[in-house]
Image (tube, rainbow, N blue to C red):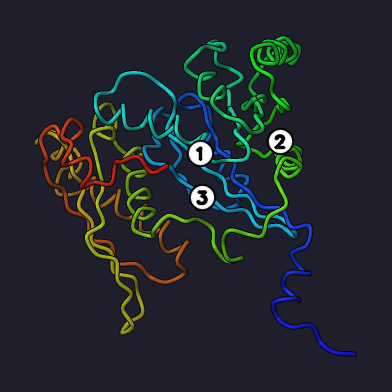
């Protein structure tokens, strides 16, 4: 009895393997990033109780026996916000292109019903569409959930409507089963140890920006962009050296970010460093600096420089 050739053995192992792309679409603060993190099992997307936290297209990759699901998190669908807002909206709308499944994530506590803003991208999608009603644990009384399901069922030919609570994982296993059945047979797109296709510099910048949302308020976090200037692993002693610049639009915002005696910047840096060390598994030296770039959210050159461009 002869051994199989390596290529033939791999092909046999992948028979029946399912792999595909699933886009998460919805209004700001619907819980898309929380759902992405829950489904993948890693905190890849930053999370904040405030809307419009996600600015870029973020991907997370789930590996299970016989299946690979590539999730795409997107900025919230909304109007307004200047040139940056336009880019975010275009990125979200184009996320329905070349994906196998679109998940419309709906905040079950939001009184806003179906409208053209959220339904128009679904009409452009030729694959499977699933409606995910998130935050159902907050719906009171529970009887109010049924008419909500019927309301969304009537507005679009969804393959499935799945009520979930991404915060605690309720019904997320059922959602995964629905998505798995909708994926085509296909070899994996990424190696089994990949959790995202985003560069480490983007993820580091998002971690810092998440802490800015945590510790500052009003316009400051929305006016902040983070650029990683250097990301290098050192061996003596072993540590990851990260140098970043936080850009804001006004000198007053810079003063708030730095804080009295640098206290605010230290809080942001300390929280971000702990998250980075937990992820990378080695000590991290994080150097944060703050600079002013006036009206960068309206400046095409600055938007490109900070990485805000159509990525789908």
Residue 247 location, x and y as percent? 18, 44
Q: Secondary structure at mark 3?
A: loop
Res 84 quadrant in image? top left
Quadrant holding the C terminus: top left
Query: Badge 3 is on which residue?
Result: 43
CA distance for labels 2 and 1: 16 Å
- Residue at 17 percent of width and 53 percent of height: 289
Res 301 quadrant in image? top left
Query: Badge 2 is on which residue?
Result: 170
Dot 2 or dot 1, earlier in sequence: 1
Q: Secondary structure at mark 1?
A: helix
Quadrant holding the N terminus: bottom right
Camera-side residue of 63 and 171: 63
Camera-side residue of 32 and 286: 32
Camera-side residue of 263 and 158: 158
Query: Badge 1 is on which residue?
Result: 33
Left or right of residue 277, residue 23 in this image: right
């Amino acid at each position: 009895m002869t051994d199989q050739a390596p290529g033939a053995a791999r092909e046999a192992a992948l028979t029946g393997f399912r792999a595909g792309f699933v886009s998460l679409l919805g209004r700001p603060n619907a819980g898309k990033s929380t759902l992405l993190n829950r489904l993948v099992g890693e905190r890849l997307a930053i999370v904040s109780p405030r809307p419009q936290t996600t600015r870029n297209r973020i991907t997370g990759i789930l590996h299970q026996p016989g299946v690979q699901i590539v999730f795409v998190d997107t900025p919230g669908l909304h109007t307004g916000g200047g040139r940056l807002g336009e880019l975010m909206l275009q990125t979200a709308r184009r996320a329905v292109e070349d994906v196998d499944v679109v998940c419309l994530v709906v905040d079950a506590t939001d009184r806003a019903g179906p409208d053209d803003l959220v339904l128009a991208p679904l009409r452009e999608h030729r694959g499977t569409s699933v409606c995910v009603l998130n935050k159902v644990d907050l719906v009171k009384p529970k009887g109010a959930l049924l008419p909500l399901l019927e309301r969304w069922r009537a507005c679009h030919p969804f393959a499935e409507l799945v009520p979930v609570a991404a915060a605690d994982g309720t019904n997320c296993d059922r959602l995964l089963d629905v998505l798995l059945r909708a994926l085509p047979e296909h070899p994996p797109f990424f190696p089994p140890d990949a959790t995202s296709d985003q560069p480490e510099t983007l993820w580091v910048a998002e971690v810092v920006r998440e802490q800015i949302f945590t510790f500052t308020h009003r316009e400051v976090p929305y006016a902040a962009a983070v650029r990683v200037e250097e990301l290098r692993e050192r061996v003596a002693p072993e540590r990851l050296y990260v140098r970043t610049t936080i850009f804001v639009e006004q000198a007053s915002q810079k003063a708030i970010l730095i804080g009295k005696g640098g206290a605010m910047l230290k809080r942001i840096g300390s929280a971000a460093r702990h998250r980075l060390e937990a992820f990378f598994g080695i000590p991290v030296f994080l150097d944060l600096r703050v600079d002013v770039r006036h009206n960068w959210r309206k400046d095409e050159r600055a938007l490109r420089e900070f990485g805000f461009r159509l990525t789908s």
